[in-house]
Image (spheres, rainbow, N blue to C red):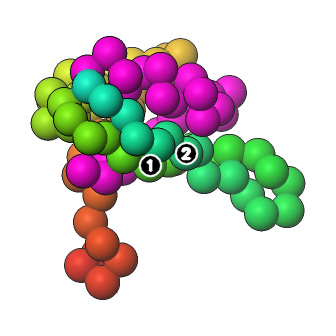
């Protein structure tokens, strides 16, 4: 399952995002989206999980990381947005 993670602290990188989710299941990939030119975080990312995705969404949605309340939900394909 592909998971959208919004309102990320600017300091979080791909590895830290993966670490946040791997305690809930098997993470296939974790990527913080960055600005193409400045390479700075855009404040959101995507995590793909083999297992435990529902648990991760339940546990992490509305949780606080570095003072920011995360928005975590199932990612919708672009055509469904």
Give the x, y percent position of residue 68.
47, 25
Residue at image location 85% in from the left, 62% down from the top: 37
The residue at which mark 1 appears reads as: 46
The residue at which mark 2 appears reads as: 31
In the displayed structure image, the side of residue 37 where residue 17 appears, left or right:
left
Label 1: which secondary element: strand
In the displayed structure image, the side of residue 2 where residue 14 appears, left or right:
right
| Quadrant where the image shows the C terminus | bottom left
Residue at image location 64% in from the left, 32% down from the top: 13
Instruction: Tell me: residue 63, above or below residue 79.
Output: above
Badge 2: how crowded within 10 Å, few (<14), some, or many (20+)?
some
Q: Does residue 41 appear in this view? A: yes
Instruction: Tell me: residue 46, above or below residue 69.
Output: below
Q: Does residue 5 appear in this view? A: no
Marks 1 and 2 sit apart, C-alpha to C-alpha, by 5 Å
Instruction: Tell me: residue 40, above or below residue 81.
Output: above
Residue at image location 14% in from the left, 36% down from the top: 54
The magenta-colored residue range is 1-24
Residue lying farthest to the bottom in this orientation: 79
Residue at image location 24% in from the left, 78% down from the top: 80
Report if residue 12 lies within the magenta region: yes
- Which is more toward the observer, 18 or 62? 18
Instruction: Tell me: residue 65, above or below residue 31.
Output: above
Quadrant of the image occupied by residue 22: top left
Tags 1 and 2 touching, CB below 8 Å: yes
Badge 1: how crowded within 10 Å, few (<14), some, or many (20+)?
many
- Which is more toward the observer, 9 or 26? 26
Give whichever of discs 1 and 2 has the lower sequence position: 2
Quadrant of the image occupied by residue 72: top left
Label 2: which secondary element: strand
């Amino acid at each position: 399952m592909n998971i959208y993670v919004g309102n990320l602290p600017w300091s979080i990188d791909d590895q830290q995002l993966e670490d946040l989710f791997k305690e809930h299941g098997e993470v296939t990939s974790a990527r913080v989206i960055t600005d193409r030119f400045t390479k700075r975080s855009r404040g959101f990312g995507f995590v793909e999980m083999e297992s435990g995705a529902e648990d991760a969404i339940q546990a992490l949605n509305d949780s606080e990381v570095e003072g920011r309340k995360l928005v975590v939900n199932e990612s919708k394909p672009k055509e469904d947005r």
